[in-house]
Amino acid sequence: MLVTDKFTLIHMHKTGGQTLNSIIANTINNAAMVGYHYPISHLPKSCEQLPIVGFVRNPWDWYVSWYCFNRYSNIKNSLYTVVSDGEQADFKTTITNLINLGSDAKSSQLYRKTLISILPESLEGNQGVGLTQQCIIDFSTNNQGYYSWLFNRMHGDLDNTNLHIGQFENLQQNFIAIMSNLAVNETEQLNAAFTSTGKLNTSKREHYSHYYDNELIQLIAEKEAELITRYHYHFQADNQSTAIVKTDHSFKKLLNKQKNFLLMKNDINVTQLTHEAKQIATEIWAASNRNKRFEVHSDTQSVHFIFDHNFAHFNPTYLSSYYHFIHLLQPIENIISEYFKSDGFIGRLIMAKLSANGEIPPHIDTGYSLLHCHRIHVPLVTNENVIFTIGGEGRNLKVGEMWEINNATVHGVENNSNEDRIHMIIDWIPNSTVRAEDRAEGGQFQSAVEAMQQQKIGDLQPCPCGSRKRYNECHGRAQLR
């Protein structure tokens, strides 16, 4: 929201707001930002009598712009992450989830529950999606799509005579016409600035019609009917081509079989491994500093077996602890390798303990490797009062089971018991996800490795590769195999 002494601009997502904000701020001296993506309900009292300016966009085009902007952005907003199931869903599924977010369908209720768990209580300091917990609590409708709900939330009463709505498709022409009608002194300067600046914050994509099939076209026509009628929009095909853009991601969590949890096996014998886990000394659990390095894991501790602090996606480090447990770990490794048909390797393997009555708050994992691996949990010590929640779906994972979870979307754990929970956590990295830069990073010490093979190096000596790790915790592990 940008306020001046002549009008207030409502910055609605993907309707030219960045362009207008820049032009107004650089042209009108008294222009002031009140808040990022603030709705009309946050209008300062001193501005209540001033005209309100906003822009609308063809709903079919808006959804494509919203999707492409979020999918190809380096920083994902929480709404996109949730309705795309952690970027596992394609365009049609993601947009269908978004359109129906307010409906009473069970899936929509789970998405709203998830959003409420991670959205802030207020818009103060907001730099992203512009929604609060209360927004989603109040969002309940089977008759209106997300875009219409958001547009009404941002602009209020659309019949208000003090509200001036332009159309994004004619952004400059409509904006300057509104400025002229409001007798804004800087109208000519604004027009000149518009011509020299052009549109900002645009997303690279095909014509919007290339993303739709008939079913999704009709869904928007029904759910956004009020805005479509009011502003005379219709779906316009691109005459040059009718091909639909492919938006599938090449890597799929849970092998694209489920959204949140996938049961891989339910009869694993972990009796001996559980016994050994219970014998691990307190100081060994504390050594990883997991509870200090990651705020969200403040109630957890871990023991690392295969692990790199930089979350390397190739050539993982086998630690000395791995060889102490190797006879117990290899059967689990073999089950996983067989499940994925040996296509890949284990990139990380740790044992994680969640303290009694502790929690891992709802969060989303980030980083290339965590988002391009199959994250697997094998419960060792747990009980019926430990609830793992992913995408709003809660489950109790039992001892003897092996689960892949979707760690790309919102997930968290509550241990509502007086017993520590212990899981094995394994990340399986498919070969197809290893990039050239991952191989280069993992292979840049090849000459040093070859040199190692020609000399005797003590297990506790520094590894010659330069990793600053002990030889037996780095390339020396190959000799121990």
Image: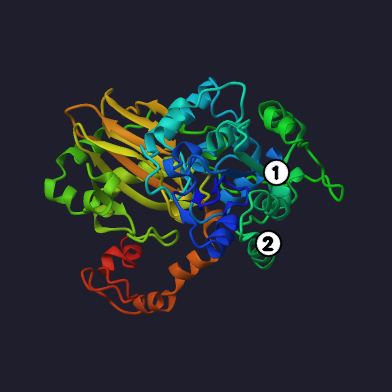
Position of residue 418 in the picture relative to residue 61 (left or right) = left
Query: Total of numbered circles in the picture?
Result: 2
Position of residue 148 in the picture relative to residue 304 (left or right) = right
Q: On the image, which quarter does residue 447 sit in?
A: bottom left
Q: Residues within 10 Å of mark 1 (few under 14, many from 20)?
A: some
The foreground one among 176 and 323 is 176
**Where in the figure is residue 204, as x and y percent of width and height?**
66, 56
**Where in the figure is residue 421, as x and y percent of width and height?**
24, 34
Q: Which is nearer the N-term, disc 1 or disc 2? A: 1
Q: On the image, which quarter does residue 143 sit in?
A: top right
The residue under label 2 is 191
**Where in the figure is residue 471, as x and y percent of width and height?**
27, 69
Mark 1 vs mark 2: in front = 2
The residue under label 1 is 61
* Vertical side of 29 occupied by 163: above or below: above
The foreground one among 110 and 235 is 235
* Vertical side of 1 occupied by 106: above or below: above
Position of residue 344 in the picture relative to residue 462 (left or right) = right
Q: Quadrant of the C terminus?
A: bottom left
Q: On the image, which quarter does residue 296 sit in?
A: top left
**CA–CA distance in space, label 1 to label 2:** 25 Å
